[in-house]
Amino acid sequence: MEVAIIVPLIVFASIVLIVGTPFYFHHRNRRVIYEAIKTSVEKTGAADPKLIAAITHDSIGPNADLRRGILLAALGAALLVIG
């Protein structure tokens, strides 16, 4: 491969990694919480209120999607300016 092809590939791959990594870790964290609730319900028949509070406290609200959208739009605008 030529260097002229590798450099843009690395730049765009790093952008994807920077944007995608927080989404992956957020998904993984929620999956662990849901598995803990599932295990708790299977063993005791009831869910622990602290686990339920952990889920409801996690970015749920009327502005949760709006905040994410504004951040992604700002990131897109920044990449447009850089480009």
Image: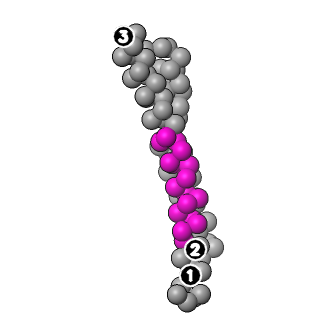
Q: Give the residue displayed 53% in from the left and 76% down from the top.
A: 9
What residue appears at the point 36 percent right and 16 percent down from the top-left corner? 42
Calculate the distance from the C-alpha at mark 2 to the C-alpha at mark 1. 6 Å
Q: CA distance from mark 1 to mark 3?
A: 55 Å
Q: Are marks 3 and 2 in contact (CB under 8 Å)?
A: no
Magenta region: 12-28
Residue 39: image location, x then y, percent: 41, 21
Q: Which residue is mark 1?
A: 6
- Label 2 amino acid? Ile
- Of residue 64 and residue 42, the one placed in the foreground of this image is 42
Most common secondary structure along the magenta stretch:
helix
Q: Position of residue 67 (x, y in %)?
A: 54, 45
Q: Position of residue 60 (x, y in %)?
A: 48, 32
> Mark 3 Cα within 10 Å, few/some/many (few <14, many 20+)?
few
Q: Which disc, if any, is residue 48?
A: none
The total number of labels drawn is: 3
Circles 2 and 1 in contact, beta carbons < 8 Å:
yes
Does 55 appear in magenta? no
SS state under label 2: helix
Q: Earlier in the sequence, mark 1 or mark 3?
A: 1
Residue pointed to by mark 3:
45
